[in-house]
Structures are given as structure tokens and as C-alpha cells.
Image (cartoon, helix red, strand yellow):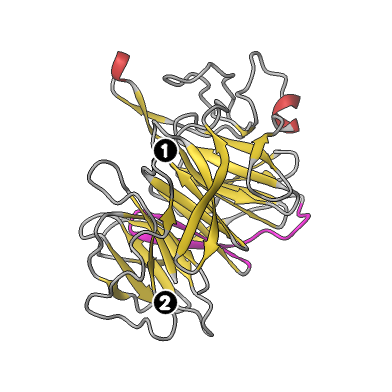
Amino acid sequence: MIFVTFHGGKTGKNNVYAYASGKGASPVASPKPRSTKVLQVGSKTKLDELRGMKLAGPLLYVANGSKKTSNVLTFQGSGTSYTLKDTLISGSLVSIDHPFAMAFDQSGHCFVSNQDTNVVAILDVDKNGETAKGGDVSSYLQGLKVKGKFLPSTFVASKNGTLPNVPAAPDLKSGQGGLKVAFSGKGSTLKVQNSVRDVALANGFLFVVDEPGGCVRIYNASSGKYYGKSGGGPLQSPTHLLIQGETLFVCAGKEIWSSALPKAKSKKPKLKFQSVTTVAAGDISGIAFDQEDPPNSYVAIRTGTPQILMGDANLQNLQAWIPKLPDSPEFLLYAPG
């Protein structure tokens, strides 16, 4: 199956939809979702502007990205039914604000990107994987010895530490790995418009999408040491990442780019992106691959007519798979079942 989150909000879809994938999922006129409400919650829990998803065995993690909600929720289940188990982390940790995506390592850590604080926060996840607490500020940032305090649990910091409605944090210089940020409005209407997006982990490195910086930045996944930004491109408004084998894909506007992953223990890890495909349908958000042999690819289109395209293992021969969605899609996730 392909799980989909949507833009959401007052007029959008604030749940995860599931669509059948695999051999029987060749492009059709209008496939119906197998389940319109994958997530089951009680009346006290509000789902709003869902974003990134991750599966770990029976647990499904979902970023609940509304500015008024700001948490990452843990669900348990299978197939097309997942029931709320707990809150992995909430906005009571001030670095968690408008979460966008998350990535988990093999050492019990979760990295969460947050649009309004423009930081990637590190969490220490409990043994059962259901809840977490804020981790320490990365040793790399602590070693910079800048004036002021970083937001609690900051692993990757904002270059500009002064953001609206966020406690002040240090500014970083060029070359120190800070994420760029763009604003809109003035005075009391000033707000963060573009900031950090997706995150991914591989081979001991953390990859972070800096949308206003037009790049993917590379960090040591243990210390937070900054190695530099991606080459190739240029990437226009990059947002979503996906790792498939030893390749990192990034979506930027109407294009998908790819780069070989840096080797583990590389002292000078690099990314050099090359264009894989360009679509005419609209701007791309999430992408996914299923587990067929060879796999099918799925590409979410969030502007124009919201839809999902389906193509081959090389992201070629893309056709309309779901030609019209009920809301603009955000993230795609392949889920067995």
C-alpha cells in the first residue's frame, strides 16, 4: 500500500489515506482508497496538517504539523488501521514547533525537523519506541562556543537565531552549518515562510533539506559536525528526501534529483545531484517505491490538480495513477499489507 498525508487544515484531509499498490496497481481511471481513515484517535486528539510518516514494525509515527498542535504521534496497528498509542514528543519541548519530518537511527534516537523553529531536534526514544524525551544539544554546536543558548535538544541549528514567537538562540556564521530561513510579513505579522524540510539518515550521516538555501546539508549523525552542502543542481525549493539503496533522491519544484550516498566513515562526505526526471503536472512533494521486483515508483503532485503519478524503478514513464486526490498530497510512504 501507499500511505498519503495531505496539506490538511480546515478544508483539507487530516488523516492518512491508503491506496493499494503493487502488481495490481497499474494506472487506472479512479482508484478508491482502501481506507479513508487509517489513523484512529479519540475525541481529545486533534489531527491537523499531517506531514512525515515512518514505520517501525507495528508502530507508525506521524508528524502532526499544525502550528496549534505540534507533536509527533505514535500509532500501533497493521494494514489500513492504526490506533493512537502515545505522543512520541510534543511542543512542550520548545524546539518542537510545526514538525515536518523525522528520521530514526539504530541507537534509539529520533531526529525531527521543525519549520517554525528552523531546527532539527534530537530525541531519546524509550525502549518500547512509544515515547521520547529531548536529547542533548549536539556536541558540535556546544563546541562552537557562541554567545547565547541553543534551543533545547537542537542537533542542527538555524543560521538566524532570532525567529518570531521562538526563544532567542545564537546566530551562526557561514560554514557553521546553520539552516537558512525566509520570512514573510512585517512587525506583528512576521512569520517563517520557508525553512528546514525533510531529514534522512544513512551511513552515519544526517541529511537535511535547507529549502531557502536550495541545498541538502550533511552532518555527522553522532556529533552533529557539519560537512557542507550538496553540489550539482541548482535545486529550486527542495523539500522531500528518499533513500533507495545507495541513492538519495530529493524533490525540488517539478524535478527529482539523485546523488550517490557518501560511503560510511567518509572523512569528506559529498552529495552531487543530477536531474532524474521533470514532470509537467505540477510541483512534486513526496515520492516512494514499493517492494515489487523491479519496484514501481510513486510521485505526489501537490500543485495544479493534486494527484499521484506511477512509474518504473528509474522514475521514468510516469503516468497518472490517481489522477485526482481530495487534497494536496504531502508525504508518501510504502506500507506492506
> Is 77 in the magenta?
no
Res 316 quadrant in image: bottom left
Report whether 284 appears left or right of 83: left
Q: Is residue 263 magenta?
A: yes
Q: Residue at x 63, y 63 (%)?
A: 57
Residue at the disc numbered 1: 44
Callout 2: SS = loop
Whether residue 232 is visible: no
Q: Is residue 273 above or below residue 9?
A: below
The reply to whether the C-beta atoms of the residues labelled 1 and 2 are less than 8 Å apart is: no
Location of the N terminus (image quadrant): bottom left
Secondary element type, mark 1: loop
What residue is pinned by disc 2?
A: 21
The magenta region covers 246-266
Amino acid on which disc 2 is placed: Ser
Q: Work out whether 78 lies above or below 69.
A: below
Amino acid under disc 1: Lys
